[in-house]
Amino acid sequence: MGSDALLSPRQHGVTKPLSLAGPSEADLLRTKKLNKFLVDAGLYESKEEAAKRKEVLARIKQIVVDWVKQLTRLRGYTDQMVKDANAVIFTFGSYRLGVHGPKADIDTLCVGPSYVNRDEDFFFVLHDILTEMEEVTELQPVPDAHVPLMKFKFDGISIDLLYASISLLVVPDDLDISDVSVLNDVDEPTVRSLNGCRVADQILKHVPNVEHFRTTLRCLKFWAKKRGVYSNVTGFLGGVNWALLVARVCQFYPNAVPSMLVSRFFRVYTQWRWPNPVMLCAIEEEELGFAVWDPRKNPKDRTHHMPIITPAYPGMNSSYNVSTSTLRVMTEQILFGNRVCEDIEINKAQWLALFEPYVFFESYRNYLQVDIVAANTDDLRSWKGWVESRLRQLTLMIERDTLGKLQCHPYPHEYSDPLKQCSHGAFFMGLQRKQGEAILEGQQFDIRGTVDEFRHSVNMYVFWRPGMEIYVSHVRRKQIPSYVFPNGHNRTRLPKRVSQHPFEEFSRKRKDDGTRVQQNGSLSPQNRDSVSPVIVNHSCAVQESNLENVGGNSQIFEVVEPKVEVEMVLESRAAGDLEQKTVMRLGMTSMA
């Protein structure tokens, strides 16, 4: 098919396209197969679920309008003001972009008038209204998040609800949220809340073919989840980050079809020289006074490893969470994707090969296991969200304290032991020495202070409740608890013909990754000044995999006000030493 008939009517992006070529017959066939694969994988919701989502959004719209009218009346405004009082609901994220799947949450923004605030009216008054509704379950306010929100399920549909109070007494139903005037006289959290919707709208405006963009993004999000690199909170990339990366590739190849765009995605970002930024358009400078991403002026912006800039004013780096370690992991996975796509293009592989799950628990010799427990499922939900948001800080702390020589791979999946009688969750991090670093005999990575600092930051949780506990332990590959594996009792060794790691040949020649972990002490939170965490009237088996008995048995913790010391040292040893039992001495003192 000739490219002349497919020329995009205008240039998209800050540079000219890399190619205006259209698809060949083989490209069209591969796209057809890709579409079928995505459908068969269950990535599209049913018409019934789509209709239910619209009903839920309409119901939420009515709830927030009634809430604003109630507050307007209570604050003594006139009857006419009460009648005109209004709130508007916008969506953003995957739902607004048109790439959401079954059971996905709906990112939702409520825009209200200037006299209805976030801190009290949203997080208390509206929260209490939602609490009384039988359709609402799992309600969780997160006021201290970078973008404050309430999470809940409404009639089974997951909702992330943000609030923005703008400088209008009456919010019209036809409010143009893309107009920069909505940012007048608002604070930074409100700008961040508004920009989710503004960015989604700008992304759709800056791609040459929206349907091709949506199919490609749906594919790449599915790939990122399979390969363990989809999680903004953990330090990888979230939905908006992947959307911006895909949109830029669509600009580079405006006439390409999805199969071509997927292949070009990996080709482009395999060669991308970070920290050069990815931008869909020029960064706008307005006179509203908000800081925009500019490493020439802002020293902090120079520290960003993988800048992906939002296209709506004020332009921000949407991927500020990325660390040296998580960038390394994503780079390796993009190399993997590029290699598979090259095979697909010469008919040596099918699309299924691209989405082969990453076998995290076969990829490292050493892991950190972070167990969390709580008194009930509601407490665990909030505790888990807080701990997960701090795991990125543990990665950064380890990078900082080892001068980047010890690399961490936080895995963005939560696990739970079904045999435990309490509310329990576990996260894991892979550990390895930085490749290319010389291994010196006796050299150590002492991260005792790092772990202490991490635990202290976690224990600062303002909504802490009795029963919320965290345990950090070292496990070697052969000691990984059985509940993390799909079949519940065994791991599946990779066939030799399957390459999970782009540097497999290099890794195979190495005797070991040069790390060893020794711990002294039990792994439990530090005491608080005013009140110590306690596990109240329940037993929770927290796996201590370092102990000699690792055959699925657990140690039962029934302690009151534990006073325990933590010591963790990572040190260099020969490969043979890694097969020896790691020493761990427990010291547990119960206080009367």
Image (tube, rainbow, N blue to C red):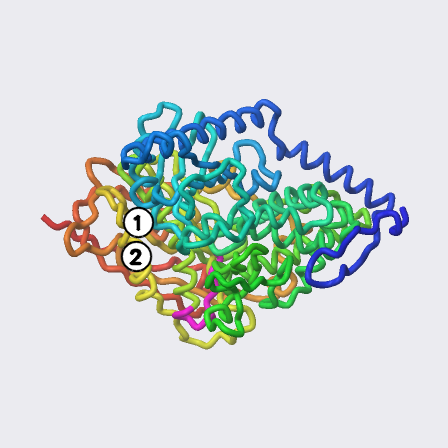
Foreground pick, 579 / 371: 371
- Image location of residue 460, percent across then percent down: 27, 54
In percent of the image, x 67 and y 32: which residue is there?
Answer: 40
Q: CA distance from mark 2 to mark 1?
A: 8 Å
Q: Can you tell which quarter of the image residue 419 is in?
A: top left
Circle 1 packing at 10 Å, graded few (<14), some (14-19), many (20+), is many
Q: Which residues are magenta?
A: 400-409
In percent of the image, x 36 and y 23: which residue is there?
Answer: 134
| Amino acid type of the residue that numbered disc 2 sits on in the rendered structure | Arg
In percent of the image, x 70 and y 36: which residue is there?
Answer: 37
- Image location of residue 302, percent across then percent down: 51, 71
Please tell me whether residue 402 belongs to the stretch shown in magenta: yes
Cβ atoms under marks 2 and 1 closer than 8 Å: yes
Residue 470: assigned label: 1
- The reply, left or right, for residue 236 in relation to residue 532 is right
- The reply, left or right, for residue 429 in relation to residue 505 is left
Foreground pick, 515 / 299: 299
Question: Which residue bears the numbered disc 2?
Answer: 455
Secondary-structure class at tag 1: strand
- Image location of residue 94, percent across then percent down: 57, 41
Q: Please state the total of marks drawn on the protein image.
A: 2
- The reply, left or right, for residue 40 in relation to residue 539 is right
Please tell me whether residue 14 belongs to the stretch shown in magenta: no
- Residue 212 visible to the viewer: yes
- The reply, left or right, for residue 306 in relation to residue 551 is right
Foreground pick, 25 / 358: 25
Q: Can you tell which quarter of the image residue 336 is in?
A: bottom right
